[in-house]
Image: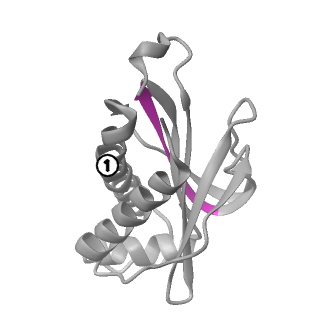
Amino acid sequence: MMDQDQVVTAVRASTVEVFSTMLGFDLTSGEPRTEVNAPGPSDGIIAVIGLAGAWVGTTSLSCDAAMACRMSTAMLGMDYTEVNEDVLDAISEIANMVSGNFKTAAESYLGPLGLSIPTVVYGLSFSARTAGKEKWIVVPFSCGKDAIEFKVCLTPNRGLPLASRH
């Protein structure tokens, strides 16, 4: 069974670990909240990764373009001041690492999960949403003046018998 506190704990640990190890960033976690149909209107970058198993859903990592460039600069060792293919690839990989760490932690209470290939969207005034009215768990982070949000939406896989779900 999924417990929101377990999800938040796993998100915080996964995000802080990746940002500390791979980028050398010190993140501060904000107060988690829930939303329906997140991720919503945005300016910046969002990386989305699907989850599949006894539970199905999506993770997303979002930030503005300046933070994406800052993260890419730290990860790739080059100075990025505008979003390009390298920045999009770096954000995709960072989201993949955080989601992968989250998946590993969550499998202890949700059972085996698989990850999709990341999809990264960049632009001004775009909207991304999921079908249905599932709740998203949103965990905001700050790194100095910059903000990042990691979101998770999970629901039991209705295609599996109840005995297959944890």
Q: Could one spot residue 3 in this view of the protein?
A: yes
Q: Main secondary structure of the magenta part?
A: strand
Name the residue at 37% across, 84% down.
Answer: 26
Rendered position, 78 above or below 12: below
As for residue 156 lying within the magenta part, the answer is: no
Q: Secondary structure beneath disc 1?
A: helix
Residue 127 picture location, percent across and down: 73, 48
The C terminus appears in which quarter of the rendering? top left
Give the residue at x 57% y 75%. Answer: 30
From the viewer's perspective, is 150 left or right of 43? left
Q: In this view, does 148 lie above or below 42?
A: below
Q: What residue type is labelled 1?
A: Ala
- Asked if residue 16 is positioned above or below residue 8 in the image, the reply reads below
* Number of dots carrying numbers: 1
Q: Position of residue 91 (x, y in %)?
A: 41, 59
Q: Where is residue 12 in the image (x, y as percent from the top left)?
A: 42, 65
In front of the other: 30 or 75: 30
Mark 1 residue crowding within 10 angstroms, few (<14) / some (14–19) / many (20+): some
Residue 27 at x, y percent in the picture: 42, 80
Image quarter of residue 76: bottom left
Frontmost residue, 42 versus 28: 28
Direction from residue 29 to residue 122 in the image, left or right: right
> Which span is picked out in magenta?
44-53
Is 45 colored magenta in this rendering? yes
Residue at image point 25% right, 70% down: 22
Relative vertical location of residue 121 with respect to residue 77 in this rendering, above or below? above
Residue 86 is drawn in which quadrant?
A: bottom left
Whether residue 85 is visible, yes or no, is no
Q: Return the residue at label 1.
A: 105
